[in-house]
Amino acid sequence: MKKYVAILIAGLMAGAALQAADLSKGKAVFDKKCAKCHGKDGKGQTTMGRKLKIKDYTKAESWAKVKDEEAVKAIKEGYKRNGKKVMPAVKGLSDEDIQNVIAYMKSLKKG
């Protein structure tokens, strides 16, 4: 029971952190570190994005499949699909930067 309460609290804290995020700072980091593959619009329609089959993060269904904790882990550690690394870890970001980037990416969601 204590484990579930701790998980619930961690999830609520992550959600609260995203709500308090600074979207303009998130956009600045996204443009510098992420847009090359994810596209400035978040649709993943760049050369690398199409090659890696990056999700369109303007679609609500893409976010429905990604938990905040998973997004944080992907940014910090990189992302593997079928055991193959498709996204390297993004170095030099603070936890605040990461929360801002995720909040900014979520702001691109339509519907």
Image (tube, rainbow, N blue to C red):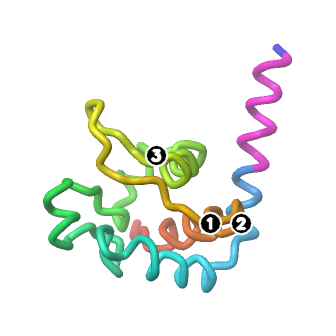
User: Of the numbered discs in the image, which one, if any, rests on residue 96?
Assistant: 2
Q: Pick whichever, 99 or 77, lies toward us.
A: 77
Estimate the spatial distance between the alpha carbons at disc 2 and disc 3, rounded to whole Å. Answer: 19 Å
Q: Residue 21: horizontal and vertical position, in percent?
A: 70, 71
Q: Residue at x 54, y 62 (%)?
A: 91
Q: Pick whichever, 84 or 73, lies toward us.
A: 84
Amino acid type, residue under disc 1 in the picture: Leu
Badge 3 crowding class, 10 Å Cα cut-off, few under 14, some 14 to 19, many 20 or more, is few
Badge 1 crowding class, 10 Å Cα cut-off, few under 14, some 14 to 19, many 20 or more, is some
Q: Which residue is mark 3?
A: 66
Q: Is residue 92 above or below residue 8?
A: below
Q: Residue 14: horizontal and vertical position, in percent?
A: 71, 50
Q: Residue 25: horizontal and vertical position, in percent?
A: 63, 82
Q: Is residue 99 left or right of residue 60?
A: right
- Callout 2: helix, strand or loop? helix
Q: Which residue is mark 1?
A: 93
Q: Residue 101: horizontal and vertical position, in percent?
A: 56, 69
- Callout 3: helix, strand or loop? loop
Q: Residue at x 36, y 76 (%)?
A: 35
